Image: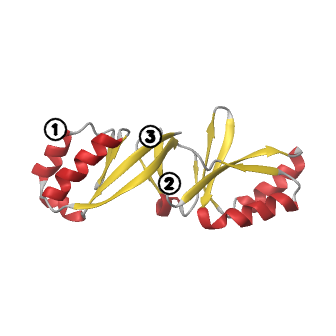
Amino acid sequence: MKQAFAVEANSEIADFPEIHDLLFQETNINWNVRNFFIYLIDEEANLAQELLEAADLFEHIHPLLVVANGKKSTTFEDYAIELDVDHCGLFASDILPFCITKGNQNDIQMAMYQFEEHLVFETRENGSALFFIDKDNIELIQKIARAYNIVVTFALDK
């Protein structure tokens, strides 16, 4: 999982191809999806923000978690954007990753049936399953884990 920054231009950028071209000339864009310009380096994102502000086209900078593609829920598009065939960016301010760190296989499977209703996205990282939920569901996930006697660890610092 990598941290990135999605610089959002307003929808009017489609009417200004010269600004779009300027961003590609002056900054090191890692991905471009619609009106989002995604950077792995915050200085590049800040420069893009300055260029968009000068053209009165800047909307917002969103911190992203870049992860390998995986299983998307029906709410995926509310929390993330597909970057390419191998990666997606999850809006870090809205989601929280967790993993299952302890429990017997049967209890884990039963808990997964409950978790699936609330997952935004699921992927594998370093050989382990990594799950993403809306931050508002942290207590719910903890209650499900306790009910099935399993341990989940939230990746608050990632």
The amino acid type of the residue labelled 1 equals Gln
Question: What residue would you read off at disc 1?
Answer: 25
- The residue at the point 59 percent across, 46 percent down is 157
Quadrant holding the C terminus = top right
Q: Nearer the viewer, residue 110 or 126?
A: 126
- The residue at the point 20 percent across, 40 percent down is 24
- The residue at the point 65 percent across, 45 percent down is 130
Give the SS element for disc 3.
loop
Q: Earlier in the sequence, mark 1 or mark 3?
A: 1
Q: Earlier in the sequence, mark 3 or mark 2?
A: 3
Q: CA distance from mark 2 to mark 1?
A: 27 Å
Q: Which quadrant of the view contains residue 95?
A: bottom right
- The residue at the point 39 percent across, 55 percent down is 62
The spot of residue 3 in percent (x, y) is 46, 42
Instruction: Tell me the crowding category of disc 2: few under 14, some 14 to 19, or many 20 or more residues within 10 angstroms, Cα based.
Output: many
The spot of residue 125 in percent (x, y) is 62, 36
Q: CA distance from mark 1 to mark 3?
A: 24 Å
Q: Height in image: 20 above or below 136?
A: above
Give the SS element for disc 1.
helix
Q: Height in image: 135 above or below 72?
A: below
Q: Earlier in the sequence, mark 2 or mark 1?
A: 1
The spot of residue 22 in percent (x, y) is 14, 44
Q: CA distance from mark 3 to mark 2?
A: 20 Å
Q: Nearer the viewer, residue 142 or 89?
A: 142
Question: What residue would you read off at disc 3?
Answer: 85
Question: What residue would you read off at disc 2?
Answer: 92
Q: Is residue 110 left or right of residue 44?
A: right
The amino acid type of the residue labelled 2 equals Ala
Q: Nearer the viewer, residue 31 or 145?
A: 145
Which mark is in front, 1 or 3? 1
Instruction: Tell me the crowding category of disc 3: few under 14, some 14 to 19, or many 20 or more residues within 10 angstroms, Cα based.
Output: few
Which mark is in front, 3 or 2? 2
